[in-house]
Amino acid sequence: MKRYASRDGRIRLLVADSRRLPDVATGSVGCILTSPPYWVRGRGRDRAERYARELATGFGPEWRRVLADHGDVWLIIGDRHDGEEWVGIDALVTAWLRRVGFRLQAKGLWAQVRSRERWDNRVNYLLRFRKAGHPVRPRGTTLCWMLPLPRSHPDSLWDATPDPVLRALLALSARRGTVLDPFAGAGTVGRIAAAAGREWIGVERDPYMAGVAARRLRLRPLTPSRPRGRRAGRRAGPRG
């Protein structure tokens, strides 16, 4: 596994599949703030259900392990019309995450303005989850934005979430513990977390995008530590 880190070690990036997070200690994460890859392929309820199931059962158990009891999961997830009906991805993901031990605490919306997309595909849900048995009191905050799609980093393969949305979600979350982005992309959440003085761990499976994020966040590649052993060129023998 390739790793990057800032000089002070507060910002880290792992090139890995976030279904398994061996570098992240149990209960050490205060907030998971991420935008999973959107469902863009296929049609029909069955395929949408499969997407939600794989997201929740593939990644949810590890999120639950690393998340502190007071921690939050914020998912930024898009919905779409598949040609026949509005799919309702938010409801499907919520139902499947409930099966792995999460409860929905808040729901907001970011709608893209000045977009060429049809209205259905411009809706992005902001879903706040907590572990079952650890509810959070709702605040008198309206989670609704009408913002254009921000300009992505020039080397990024994917779109970004507007900074005001990310800052607001992070401010509403638990302020103790590391911020984790299991789908780090170009590192936008890492930039927002660092500006807020938070520790951050990003996980990105694509080596190219991990390199983009590392350069953007000015991270250094970490050299794997070598196992201790005898020096090369010397034979083992009895001590004199």
Image (tube, grey):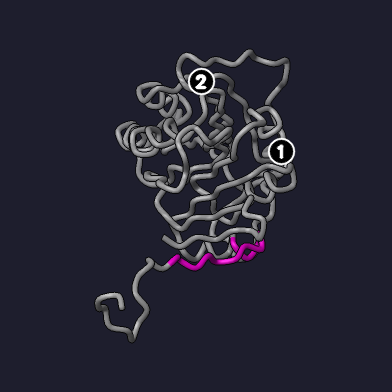
Q: Amino acid at mark 1?
A: Arg
Residue 130 at x, y percent in the picture: 51, 23
| Residue at image point 50% right, 48% down | 183
Count numbered badges in the picture.
2
Residue at mark 2 to residue at mark 1: CA–CA distance: 20 Å
- Label 1 secondary element: helix
| Residue at image point 45% right, 60% down | 206
Residues rendered magenta in the picture:
214-225
Residue 239 at x, y percent in the picture: 30, 75
Q: Quadrant of residue 215?
A: bottom right
Whether residue 5 is situated above or below residue 91 in the rendered picture: below
- 10 Å crowding of disc 1: few (<14), some (14-19), many (20+): some
Q: Is residue 162 left or right of residue 222?
A: right
Residue 140 at x, y percent in the picture: 73, 15
> Taking the image as drawn, is residue 21 in sight?
yes
Mark 2 or 1 closer to N-term?
2
Q: Quadrant of residue 213?
A: bottom right
Foreground: 183 or 70?
70
